Image (cartoon, rainbow, N blue to C red):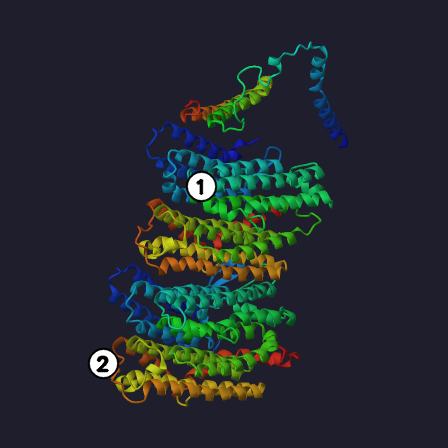
Amino acid sequence: MSAGFPILTTILVAPVLGALAIVLLPREARQTVKYVAAFAMGTALMLALYCYFAYDFVRGGMQFTESVPWVPELGVTYAMGVDGLSLPMVLLTALIGFSAVFSSWGTEERVKEFFVLLLLLLIAGVVGTFLTRDLFIFLLFYELVVIPIYILVILWGSSKRVTKEYAGMKLTIYLLVGSAFLLVGVLALYIQAYPPGERTFLMEGLAAAAALGHLPESFQVPVFFLLLLGFGSLISMWPFHSWSPDGYAGAPTAVSMIHAGVLKKIGGYGLIRLGIAVLPLGAKYWAPAIAALGVVNVLYAAFIAISQRDLKYVVGYSSVSHMGFVLIGIAALNVVGISGAVANMFAHGVMSALFFALIGYLYGQTHTRNMDELGGLAHQMPYAATGLMLAGMASLGLPGLISFVPEFTIFVGAFARFPVLSVLAVAGIVLTALYTLRLLANVLFGPRQVRFDHLPDTGGPALVPLVVLGAVLVVFGVFPALLMKMAGSGVAPLAAILDGIALAARMGGGL
Amino acid sequence: MLQDYGAIALLMAVALIFPFIPLFVSAYIQTKKPTTEKLSTYECGVDTIGKTWVQFKTSYFLYALVFVVFDIETVFLYPWAVKFQVMGTFAFVEMLIFVAILVLGLCYAWRKGALEWQ
Amino acid sequence: MDLSLLTTEIVTVALACFVVALDLLMPAGEPRRALGYLTLLGLAGIFVHAFTQYGLNASLYGGMFRVDDYAVFFKQVFLAAYMLTILFSVRTADGFAPYTGEFYGLMLFSLAGMMVMASANDLVTLFVGMELMTITFFVLVGFNLGDGKSSEAGVKYLILGAASTAVLLYGMSLIYGYTGTVVLPEIAARLSASPAALVGIVFFLAGFAFKIAAVPFGMWVPDVYEGAPVPITALLAMASKAASFAVLTRVFLTAFADAPYNWPLIIAWLAAASMIAGNLAAILQTNVKRLLAYSSIAQAGYLLTGLVAAGPDGVKGIIFYTALYVFASAGAFAVVAAVRDETGSDDIAAYRGLARSSPLLAAAMTVALLSMAGIPPLAGFVGKLYLFLAVLEKGWFWLALLGFVMSMVSVYYYLLVVKAMYLGEPAGAPTADGCAALRWAALASLALTVLCGVYPTPLAALASRVAQNFFQ
């Protein structure tokens, strides 16, 4: 299949071409800009769906691969490929990117620049990190997205509790400083893995080096720590989480959707793909610490979410809390837990994107995000209310919706290793139910309020995210195998590595 | 290596002593008939009025700079002239270029009015 | 003796004389822009010619002057820096009338000095080249006649520069006194442990740390950068720094490579101090020129890490990074020149709304600054990667970590400028758009920075080849 049509590159290039087309359009062609954007993302979504369903489970491993030497002397290859780990993330990015275009339909200011930045740099960058098999290209795409986010936040963001300049800067600096640690870790790995001349940035190559024993435990432990700092701040692991709620609150709707929905997941994805596959001994050393921090994430963020009044802060802390589950799943270091983590990242991505899309819509209509000032909106906005209910129920893990099975799987996996921590984390679900239900009750239900009567319900373009993401929530909830099979096939190759380290004696991390 | 330094030291000693020889000789053989006029600070010109720490007109410096052009020219022309026949055409062309650069400098100063006293 | 090896230097000096002579012949009061374009054209010719000098690896004057790949590469870097600078300085230079011709002429003379530095293979030639460069810069820094800040900068640069030269010269004399030679390879052969050699090396390093603006010898940088005319600031930041790095690397890797002292450690401390102090001090700046000055101190720190690595990889990092620092700085200073020409101010506030009045200039500035910060996919990222990979390889873990963290800290102050350009509304005053030549400079910088970041292979391959120079 490698010689065939470069489908993954097309997924990457579709938004870029769309953005180039937009650049060439005149500034006044506001509607055309949106159509072009929607078309580009639609193409990417179709291709991503095709890949998802054409993926060959029997064969497993990397498929749709492409490979072009890029910087030969450094061992950088433009290598594309997806497996069961990355494919859900690619699909997620395409889904959310497509929905984000429609959520931004109401953008008034600087429409052209908004879509160029959003499409060209942000979505292409995010999807690129998941498509590539080369660590160098991965880092390239990862840092590529940070600056557009900054500009998007300071230009189109909103200042409520914190100014958008503050939010944007905080988010940017956190992510970049995290990435500095990541970068040093990656370079150390690159140097250690092979002698000069044979070096490669290919992730398979690095994993092979680990299997060959080129990476002793004394090397893996500190380097994994560096990676944990980088990926951990990205996945908003406590105590590096504080950029996340502020950032989401300041960001425009589409950026919140993409950021909470997919960008964060790069952290979890990186921890699995790089942390566990390449540095298994390091992962084993730090696993208890990760699990403990994951539990702190779940409980601490949930408690804070309970006390928030601003809708975006509630969802922001809720997303920090949900990432705790992912961390616990990863720390379980068994196939069940990790595939649960992968699936949960997908589930949470869809759900939080839907949440942010609807909150953005509500805010656009009512000009407030304060829970106390809203109420009874189910009377005026039945569609939006349905969407929020779906997202909320998925958030608290209602069976039949997307996140039930992944979370359950995580707990099954984690309980085997960390019984006490797992029980604590399960308690977090109760807190999640508390703040989610309270949010829904405060905003949607209660007596009809006359002052909201003139507000229209979601309709037209704004309905697209609701339909697309809502449908995914239900379909993947009813047929969990769609997701679990994919995640399982992605994690399956790790089984050998995980069995290998199960025998390794040492386990530390201070716990 | 020490011998090389010895030669330098000897040269320095000679150079230091040499200027004093004419001074001593003249002091020894001269006749002394001092007058008030001879003992004043300036034998010629006028006595200074006020402080001597005054600003000079910058034209002085410009003249000094232009003088450097000719000074350097002489410094390099002299050894060149001595060895001219040994060095041949190459050195001749080289010196022409050198002089041309200096002439450019002079033309520049001239054109920019460095030689005019306002 | 093959004089054709000296073509680049000879043509540069001839061009300088020609420009000065032409300036004399042109009637006073007429615009001198043609001189700028003539200079540009001449430099472009020399640049192209320099390609033919790769692979020659010849010596002149009994080994005092080397035309090797390393020297040729650096000459091309200087030429690129000067070409870009001249492109964006034509309008600034118009403001120097009636001394526009001299401005171009002096620039060319300083370029000739740098070329000599790049090729110098003995301490005296090196010193002569450096003085030619420095003395012309003393004049050029104070070229904004009637502007107190410019004159102050000129005098400051003169006094501090002279002091640093004295230190440098003292160091050289100690090395000469101890080894009895000034030719670099012979120094390497005769150097052994002694207090004189140690003090000589340290003084030499201190003298050049002044030129490259490393902490603590870079205290002159903010004031001089702020006061000097924008094109000269740009040249000080790009070309003068590059020339000094060319010398520093050559001397340390040929003459002092086997010196029985752990000089990489000293340089590592210098690099660390520069990265930390430069980046932290830059955060507080409100004047873009001062901001770029502190940032250039930090950049000197990054470049020094390549010298710490003291191997082909490190040299390659230095070479690669120098080239793309030139590309990035040219773009940044082009925008500074445009804003300065139009508003007369260098404050960050003057950049408000630039993205609306001139999207190209705003984009060029953004890309340039982010490249200096090392954000992919811009060239600066690849450059830092090469530098820090080289030191990591030698086991300098803390230095690489510090470098990366400090680069990310630097994003903060670079983004302040970006924010002003994209967020603010133009303050009513006429906004900068620059003249056509300036926009070309900005465009070239933008294109080169992105290109070298996305596809670094050609430049990296050249850098690898050049870096083998000292290790055959």
Residue type of the residue flagged with mark 2: His
> Would residue A367 be found to the left or right of residue C221 on screen?
left
Q: Residue at x 65, y 37 (%)?
A: C182
**Element type at mark 2:** loop
- Quarter of the image where the C terminus of chain A is located: bottom right
Q: Quadrant of residue C164?
A: top right
- Which disc is residue C148 wearing? 1
Query: The residue marked by circle 2 belongs to what chain?
Result: A
Residue A478 vs C132, above or below: the answer is below
Instruction: Report crowding for label 2: few under 14, some 14 to 19, many 20 or more residues within 10 A (C-alpha).
Output: few
Q: Is residue B93 visible?
A: no
Q: Residue at x 41, y 32 (%)?
A: C19
Residue type of the residue flagged with mark 1: Gly
Give the CA separation, mark 2 to mark 1. Answer: 65 Å
**Element type at mark 1:** helix
> Would residue A460 be found to the left or right of residue C115 on screen?
left
> Would residue C260 be found to the left or right of residue C227 on screen?
right
- Marks counted in the figure total 2
Residue A35 vs C230, above or below: the answer is below
- Which disc is residue A473 wearing? none
Q: Nearer the viewer, mark 2 or mark 1?
A: 1
- Which disc is residue A454 wearing? 2
Residue A505 vs A2, above or below: the answer is below
Image x and y of residue A316, in percent = 42, 77
